[in-house]
Amino acid sequence: MESLKEKILTEGDAIGTEIVKVDGFLNHQIDVKFLEEISEEFRRRFDGVEVDKILTVEASGIAIACMCAPLFGYPPVVFAKKAAPSTMNEGFYEAEAKSFTKGTVSKLKVAEKFVNEGERILIIDDFMASGEASAALARIAEEAGAEIVGIGAVIEKGFQGGSDRLREMGYRVESLAVIDKIEDGVITFR
Amino acid sequence: MESLKEKILTEGDAIGTEIVKVDGFLNHQIDVKFLEEISEEFRRRFDGVEVDKILTVEASGIAIACMCAPLFGYPPVVFAKKAAPSTMNEGFYEAEAKSFTKGTVSKLKVAEKFVNEGERILIIDDFMASGEASAALARIAEEAGAEIVGIGAVIEKGFQGGSDRLREMGYRVESLAVIDKIEDGVITFR
């Protein structure tokens, strides 16, 4: 998606060899108008795909998933939580996702009642690195007997192998901008 | 907002005397079509109010703030973070918000570059209890020299005094559904 690559180059910050910071439009401040464009691109990529539910992870994924919903016929959006709130008193699915850049492990939680057998689920991710978050959401969906119809990532750090790994697992992955290299403040796209 | 009260009564869960759980459409699973209605109501309540930025708190606030943005002319949405990510390496404002129900204290953080002097800021909150989260966002905005043009809460637990407190501080508060009492599983609205 050319406008996204352009936006990453003009507004993003390359840090070291592994981090691209896009907190000006995606991860802290959100450009909702631009997210509408991103959602339209996801709709194009998953043209004809029927979606019963959109699954994502808090926090940044929520904005993209919600902006996508109208274009997919308003399926419910469910976001996995990184910590269980005190009101999460019923059964929930849990799957671990390692963050390679942060070196931490999150236990993603989704209430059992919000993922059901036979549902066609689209997973939406803001940033794909090693694909751990999407893989964790996929495990949760499959544990519930749901079907993953696709995984969409806004930005993918291609050099960390996330989409390759997810495709090997049999999933369809669409990344709107794939970064191949970050070096000396320069971002190179695939 | 009658449709919201109806939705709280049919889909919400009253727990004890202090908690209403609406994870079926607002806090875990999100009904995006319904959030569009909520956003239209906020636009009506803040009719004629010019908004340069919408400020909210992760995670549930993000969905509502993003759905509101198109109706307010697409101002940037900024969400305060409860924990500073490793990439938050520049200056940020910080304000404490106590959660009376959870008994915890969150340190809300907003990067300095995303709140600016003279900006007209609309604060959007999903759930208002004692008003601590909104008050913390207001302190951050004022520290930056911005102006609070309004505070909008989807659901307010009126008996915890949040909006009264915020109005005493001089803010305009609009809550779309004010709960007066939760008792024996019954929710009473103001």
Image (tube, coloured by chain):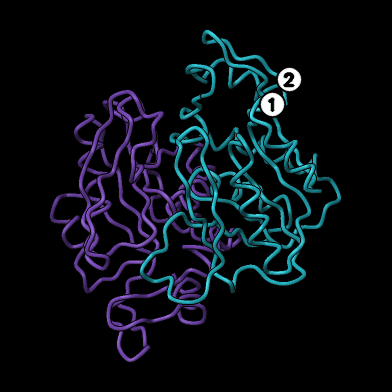
Chain colours: A purple, B cyan
Q: Residue at x 39, y 64 (%)?
A: B85
Residue B178: image location, x then y, percent? 69, 26
Q: B143 or A171: nearer the eye?
A: B143
Q: Quadrant of the C terminus of chain B?
A: top right
Question: Earlier along the polypeptide chain: callout 1 or callout 2?
Answer: 1
Q: A40 or B18: nearer the eye?
A: B18
Using the numbered discs, state the Cα–Cα distance from disc 1 to disc 2 in whole angstroms: 6 Å
Q: Residue at x 41, y 28 (%)?
A: A87
Question: Residue most toward the left?
Answer: A168
Disc 1: which residue: B178
Q: Amino acid at mark 2?
A: Arg
Q: B82 or A109: nearer the eye?
A: B82
Q: Residue at x 53, y 59 (%)?
A: A35
The quarter holding residue B1 reads top right
User: Element under label 1?
Assistant: strand
Disc 2: which residue: B190
Q: Are marks 1 and 2 in contact (CB under 8 Å)?
A: yes
Residue A63: image location, x then y, percent? 50, 51
Residue B35: image location, x then y, percent? 60, 37
Badge 2: how crowded within 10 Å, few (<14), some, or many (20+)? few
Q: Amino acid at mark 1?
A: Val
Q: Residue at x 56, y 11 (%)?
A: B183
Question: Residue most toward the right?
Answer: B48
User: Element under label 2?
Assistant: loop
Residue A118: image location, x then y, percent? 27, 27
